[in-house]
Image: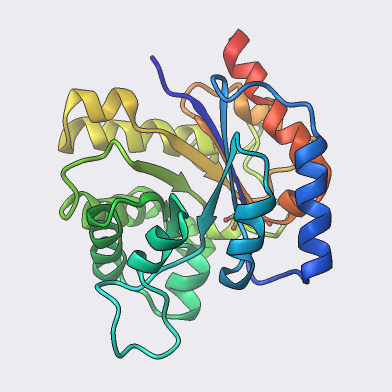
């Protein structure tokens, strides 16, 4: 199969220099599976990128949480893909639901950002996911497919894309779809459907190699059960990525290895 487990930590808009140093030191001291087994990427706010980049262990990598949709210039307050490349930041998260909903980023805008970031040599964690209303209306796959389509329409090379399925209703709420819930609500089911979507709309190689990771209230207690699901290739973790349990989440890659 050859999809390396991926664990991302999205620190969102939190932290002080002291807190960042503490998290980095916890990560640096941790015993985790080798980078052959799991790819670990942490995503601090922009202002802490140089600090994290220069102090984080070399087997973990760094992602920005966003970047501008095109070449930098007169765009006050924005950070360009070129600047991230210049700083040696290899990854960027794009299309997070908090940006889609709070900052009105449309599917097309996110697709354009993904395409531009890739064109500059960044690797992209592209986020998709439905809201509670959309899920209750039964339109989960329609929404997620439209978000993925806007990316696929602009991207021909998927080698540097990780797709993150993050149902909005599961982010920061403590609610994770469990196997006990209706099957269509469970992350593995949406992951399965997403892979089917890739099958219908991309190439066999993209289907086989693209990692589809899950985000939404992943923690040290539920990560192993989620990691065992066949179409879950890793996690994008918010709250728990700021805590020592992030190490346990990284270690859940072992579940996949032995599966
Ligand atoms: O939004 C998320 C990661 O990008 C998930 O956040 P939580 O893990 O805090 O639910």
Q: How is the image coloured?
A: rainbow
Looking at the rendered image, the quarter that the N terminus falls into is top left
Question: Residue at the spot x=27%, y=53% of the render?
Answer: 118
State which quadrant residue 37 falls in: top right
Q: Position of residue 211 (x, y in %)?
A: 41, 33
Residue 185's place in the image compared with 80, above or below, is above
In this view, the residue in front, 12 or 88, is: 88
Residue at figure coordinates x 67%, y 40% from the top left: 57
Q: Is residue 105 visible?
A: yes
| 155 relative to 54 in the view: left or right | left
| Position of the C terminus by quadrant | top right
Q: Is residue 80 above or below residue 127?
A: below
Left or right of residue 22, residue 251 in this image: left
Instruction: Note whether residue 129 is visible.
Output: no
How far across and down, in percent of the image, does residue 46 sit?
A: 56, 70
Tell me what residue is drawn at x 75 percent, y 69 percent. Answer: 15
Of residue 206 and residue 139, the one placed in the foreground of this image is 206
Q: Position of residue 122 (x, y in %)?
A: 35, 52
Relative side of 153 to 87, left or right: left
Residue 154 screen position, x and y as percent: 17, 55
């Amino acid at each position: 199969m050859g999809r390396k487990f991926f664990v991302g930590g999205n620190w969102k808009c939190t932290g002080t220099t002291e807190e960042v140093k503490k998290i980095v030191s916890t990560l640096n001291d941790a015993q985790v599976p080798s980078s052959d087994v799991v790819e670990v990427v942490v995503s601090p706010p922009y202002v802490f990128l140089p600090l994290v980049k220069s102090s984080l262990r070399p087997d973990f990598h760094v992602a920005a949480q966003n970047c501008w949709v095109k070449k930098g210039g007169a765009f006050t307050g924005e950070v360009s893909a070129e600047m991230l490349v210049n700083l040696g930041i290899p990854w960027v998260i794009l299309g997070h639901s908090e940006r889609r909903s709070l900052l009105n980023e449309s599917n097309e805008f996110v697709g354009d950002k993904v395409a531009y970031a890739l064109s500059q040599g960044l690797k992209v964690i592209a986020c998709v996911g439905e809201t509670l209303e959309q899920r209750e209306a039964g339109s989960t796959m329609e929404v997620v497919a439209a978000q993925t389509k806007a990316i696929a329409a602009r991207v021909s090379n998927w080698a540097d894309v990780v797709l993150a399925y993050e149902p909005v209703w599961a982010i920061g709420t403590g609610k994770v779809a469990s196997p006990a819930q209706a099957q269509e609500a469970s992350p593995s089911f949406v992951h399965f459907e997403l892979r089917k979507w890739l099958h219908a709309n991309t190439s066999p190689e993209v289907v086989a190699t693209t990692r589809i990771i899950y985000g939404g209230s992943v923690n040290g207690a539920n990560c192993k059960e989620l990691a065992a699901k066949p179409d879950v290739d890793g996690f994008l973790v918010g709250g728990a990525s700021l805590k020592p349990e992030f190490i346990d989440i990284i270690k859940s890659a072992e579940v996949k290895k032995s599966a």
